[in-house]
Image (cartoon, helix red, strand yellow):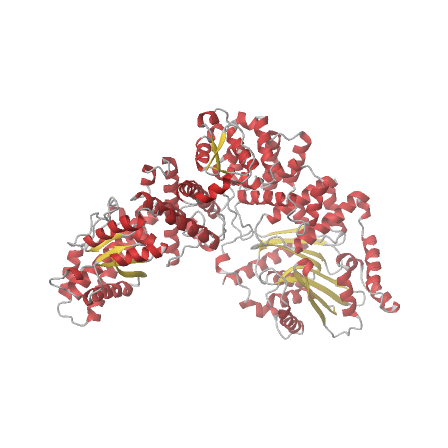
Amino acid sequence: MTPLREASVAPVSDGAAKAPAPDEKPAPGALTLWDCGALMSMLATQLADEHDPRARRAVIVKALAAKRQEALAAIEATLQANPRDARPITRAYADLTDAVVTAAFLAATQILHPLGNPTQAEKISVLAVGGYGRAEMAPHSDIDLLFLTPWKLTAWAESVIESMLYILWDMRLKVGHASRTVKDCLRLGREDYTIRTALLERRFICGEEALAEELRKKLRNELFRNTAPEFIEAKLQERGDRHKRQGGQRYMLEPNVKEAKGGLRDLQTLYWIGKYIHGVRSPAELVDVGLLRADEFCAFEAAENFLWAVRCHLHLITGRAADQLTFDLQVEVASRMGYRDSGGRRAVEHFMQDYFRHATHVGELTRVFLTVLEQRHVKREAALAGLFRRRKKLRGGFRIDKGRITIGNEREFLSDKLNLLRIFEEALRTGYLIHPDAMRVVTANLDMIDDDMREDREATRIFLDLMLKHGNPERALRRMNELGVLSAFIPEFEPIVAMMQFNVYHHYTVDEHTIQTISTLAQIERKELIEELPLSSSILEEGVNRRVLYVALLLHDIGKGRPEDHSILGAQIARRVAPRLGLNAEECETVEWLVRYHLFMSDMAQKRDISDPRTVRDFAKVVKTKKRLDLLTVLTVCDIRGVGPNTWNNWKAMLLRRLHAETSDALVAGLESVNREKREDEQKRALREALKNWDAKDLRKETGRHYGPYWQGLSTETQAVFAELLRGIADDEIRIDIKPDLDRDATRACFALADHPGIFSRLAGALALVGANVVDARTYTSKDGYATAVFWVQDAEGHPYEHDHLPRLRTTIERTLKGEVVAREALKTRDKIKKRERQFQFPTHITFDNDGSEIYTIIEVDTRDRPALLYDLTRTLAANNIYIASAVIATFGAQVVDSFYVKDMFGLKLHTKAKRDSLERKLRQAITEGAERARA
């Protein structure tokens, strides 16, 4: 196989075939894959005695398809050899398509429908439009053709076009086409901006070149000239709508390489506008006409090359025109492009960090480029309206240019390097956006931000004021991050810029997540989240050290992306950075502590049973003071909400509120006040009040039939439900109560039945069969031998079950408990992981904790989630005579942490190491076997 770079290079020659477009520079080294004249001669000889039209066309298709497949293999081999160099590849695919289209045209005009002396009306010009017109194609890009004729189509022209299309379609090519006159093109281009854009990117392929030249002149003189403002307006609107459809974020987990914010279409928009206004023939000419600087074009070129490489690999992996960089494809593209695991991070995470950094550069380029054009050509009335809006007066050294803040005198501005920060402060203070010219000056002079400036008191004052003083810190921080100022001022921040975490839980890159958390804190301070976050709102209303809280949020994930525990490493980094930002010794110590323990409250609330007094006492011992408790609570709430949309819910809010309240009481009254006896007495008193209509004898029986853990583990409302279920229950009866628990964003399922081994596992299996996700569970055995089990479950979308679905839920559970359905067998076909999520890999960690609870051993299983995991784990525990008192399930995307509070068959903790080791082996075996089944 001949690698593409060694293929011969010359224009396709066929007399009237291919020529460079009159308004484009021919690309150097345009690829020739075969001699069209020789191919036509060979086909004419083969078809001399064949008169059936379909058979003749089939011979042509077979010959072209064979040559095309050979060329495709050569192009793919070249990409494999240079997997990140897309420029010659996209041009090669376009050259190959040119050769195929040209051959199809010659076959149609010379072999299938020869015409000795065509009239002027029978002239045809074949043009490429769209991406094909730019001579940029991925392996499965559409082929968009324009058949240009002088007047209405003649019968011969219709036959030629139809035969060409059938040849291309028979080759399984995806062809878009239109047959128009020059007049049609002008009329439709005026009416439709999509058509106008396609015409902007036309390129002559073969046929009558004079027609293509006529179209070029008339488009420029009669359509494009003097209509730049309306075209730019349309492209800006189209860009905004496209971004909205794609989610509106540059850091989407599964970005569309072509259409997403920071993708190829944004770069193409720059080129379209430059070509429309200035007639540029290549992106490089955007520098010549002053729309981009040389360094900006380098960023343009690097991003374009990278994104096209990704797109080409996507097409080749999937065998189709796939532009969505889904999780499963991210791993394969990263491997094809030569990324490798290193520094404690997976290859795919390094790859996606590069992707998001390029997307950020594209965003900056489009912002600068389009803002300049918008100011020159469109929306001038908006700028005029801004003159009458009351704004704060600008400080010296700055001025307003068409509604945006810019630099008065560049030399004076750069004479004081603190101005590189002041401009962001001035923009926040006055409410003006920063002018792109000012952004360019800032990015060109980032090297001025040195150690002296980082230690400068005024510089740190400005930086802290950006977060603390103006009420909108995320706007300044996001712009500073995108321009590189944030990483220049805090170099420790640079490694997490555009850092992607390869899991479905985190919706943003680490830097964007950090800014989102600060945005949430600012919203709370602005009193915008009082109803959603009453606890955090009240804490801030009472007063906390805002400097500590904002700096802690800024630094809480700064240690990510390395092999070490990011909380510990982050605390070490915070120890260096916080003093540099002007915090005093006490504040620095608190920031360091908050960064070190920023996951602690979330872990205790979501992975431990907070009804166990030991949980609260252990948490309070680490927190020590009410001040730290309040700071950690607000930081935890902001951290969870900053993970992504829908991550925060009532369940997490309830857990955190409860942990905060009980810890606060313990810190005030003393840790010894948190004990089982006190809770039991309080719960029995509350239940008597809830059941005050009950007969005294029945009430005594109910309050006396349960052991201590029952009273500590359930709310009074749930205990009242169980009291009704147990009242008069028969030994062979199963009673079920299923109701929505909106305070917890879940459905609560209560079960009362005669106790027997493995009941927890059977219930977990029944719930898995209906696709329920268990988020929390408790099971207790009464003194008279009844099991009282409660599960809180959510549907596949993480919501409580709809009322209409509850009967099916109940029926399936009843059938499973009666033995009519065997969960283990039924789950074999349902315990599957979606293909797009199979690349999420989490090592399994199993720990045994005999200190976290007074009477139970806590078994924590941290592993890859799947539908039947909880059933497999609980079945394994039951088979080894382990009694499960409660299960706390914390799900983080595709990762799950299941914590089981257990005893052995004698009611004791698992003290023996041999027993724990044996149980761990069996749990790991169950996880491995289940994972293999789920991937089968």
Quadrant in the picture for residue 362:
top left
Q: Quadrant of residue 790?
A: bottom right
| Residue 631 image offset from top left, x and y in percent | 68, 41
Q: Is residue 934 left or right of residue 290?
A: right
**Closer to the camera, 739 or 925?**
739
Give the vertical position of 217 relative to 723 (above or below): above
Mark yes or no: residue 587 visible: yes
Q: Taking the image as drawn, is residue 622 in sight?
A: no
Residue depicted at 74% across the width and 74% down the height: 733
Would residue 597 appear left or right of 20 to someone viewing this image? right
In this rendering, position of residue 205 left or right of residue 174: left
Q: Relative to residue 619, is residue 745 depicted above or below?
A: below
Residue projecting furthest to the left? 116
Residue name at image x 55 percent, y 50 percent: 506
User: Is residue 96 left or right of 610 when viewed as pictured?
Assistant: left
Measured from the top left, where is residue 156 in percent x and y?
18, 66
Residue 187 x %, y %: 30, 57
Frontmost residue, 158 versus 310 = 158
For the image, the number of numbered tags is: 0
Seen as rendered, the residue at the extreme right is: 696
Expressed as whole percent of the image width and height from the top left, the position of residue 277 reads 33, 44
In the orientation shown, which residue stands out farthest toward the front? 388
899 shown above or below 446: below
